[in-house]
Amino acid sequence: MIRKLLPHLFPWILLAIVLLLLVPMAYPVELPLEYHFYHFILFWLLLAIYYWNVNYLLPVIHKKHGLFYYILCIIAIAIASVFLMELVSNALNIRELMHQKLRPGEPYVKKRNIFIFFYIIILVTIILATGVILELVKKWNQEEKHNIILREEKSKAELSTLKAQIQPHFFFNTLNTIYALSHSDVLQSQEALLQLSKMMRYAMNEKNRGKVQLEEEIGFIKNYLDLMKHRLPKNVDFKADILDVNTDLEIVPMILLTFIENCFKHGITTEKSCEIIIETALNDTRFTLKTQNEIFENKVKSLDSSGIGIDNTIKRLDILYPGNYTYISRKEDGKYYCELQIDLK
């Protein structure tokens, strides 16, 4: 409650100090009590004008003819304030009392003081303008917070959609692998199903987690590679250098899988010998994944448009690691190279 009141109280306390203490101190003589009472009334008038402006006048600007109505109202407020304070000044006999204090011995001649007119107009204008500026800032902050919430909700929705697309895509390919294996080696297909169950358990557990330990993700990748070894023909030279990590670093789950999966999807043939190389490295907080596989003519088209997996993973990286990752892929000498670096700090 106090925290909410402080932003409102502080400016008014400051204004009260200026009107009731600092301004009187500028005079070389002790001012009459009526002068202080005059500024006390002026202070409360300015307070009323500010909150009337903020709570009742500014909200009508957006209505039909609202701006015209608002301008008329503030002109009326300024004029009414001048006349009201003029009445207070006359009732308290401020001018004559001030004249006696500042010019003792000189006869007082009653006349209008144009300075007082501009003094009131300037104060009222400052109060009205302050209200407008603060309301604009408040509205801008509210819109910015609303936009941030919308962006966060949009990102969450996009991530949910992308993950929903990637996981079925991965498990569909893996089940195809096990199905093919079941025709040649029943025992190995059973082992593969066991590994798949571990991977599915991991995928289900991470579903509602934003990040997992890097060690867990590396374990998932190792299980996947062990599973894929079962389907590799003898002509494939498969090399994997997957580091063992012991770190508190975290990573978005299943963000590496698609790049590895593509090696097996596009880099295998039974017609000639081929090579697949997968390497990982960790330098401080920067994690690196490198893959290399052969390019075959009948798979070039599918490699160029690697489908829903790569596209969605890149979108996830854009959302989750903006400016903190690099992805490079190239074709060279009949091979396809891919390098992904993510700063996990």
Image (tube, rainbow, N blue to C red):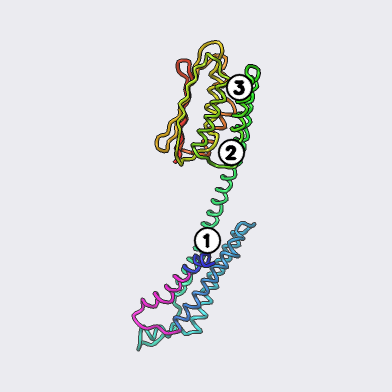
Earlier-in-chain disc, 2 versus 3? 2
Closer to us: 13 or 24: 13
Give the residue type at disc 1.
Val
Q: In the picture, which quadrant includes the C terminus?
A: top left
Q: Does the magenta stretch include residue 322?
A: no
Q: Are marks 1 and 2 in contact (CB under 8 Å)?
A: no
Q: Residues within 10 Å of mark 3 (few under 14, many from 20)?
A: some
Circle 3 SS class: helix
Identify the residue under disc 1.
Answer: 132
Q: Which residue lies furthest to the left in this view?
A: 28
Of tags 1 and 2, the one toward the viewer is 2
Image quarter of residue 174? top right
Of tags 3 and 1, the one toward the viewer is 3
Q: Does the magenta stretch include residue 22?
A: yes
Q: How crowded is mark 2: few (under 14 residues within 10 Å), some or many (20 or more)?
A: some
Residue 64 drawn above or below residue 77: above
Q: Residue 159 carries which label?
A: 2
Give the residue type at disc 3.
Gln
Residue 249 drawn above or below residue 275: below
Closer to us: 226 or 39: 226
Q: Give the range drawn in magenta.
A: 12-33
Q: How far apart are marks 1 and 2 (CA)?
A: 40 Å
Closer to us: 336 or 142: 336
Image quarter of residue 163? top right
Q: Which residue is drawn at 46% across and 78% down?
A: 112
Q: Where is residue 312 in the image (x, y as percent from the top left)?
A: 57, 32
Asked if residue 285 shows in the view, the reply is: yes
Image quarter of residue 332? top left
Identify the residue under disc 3.
Answer: 188
Give the residue type at disc 2.
Leu
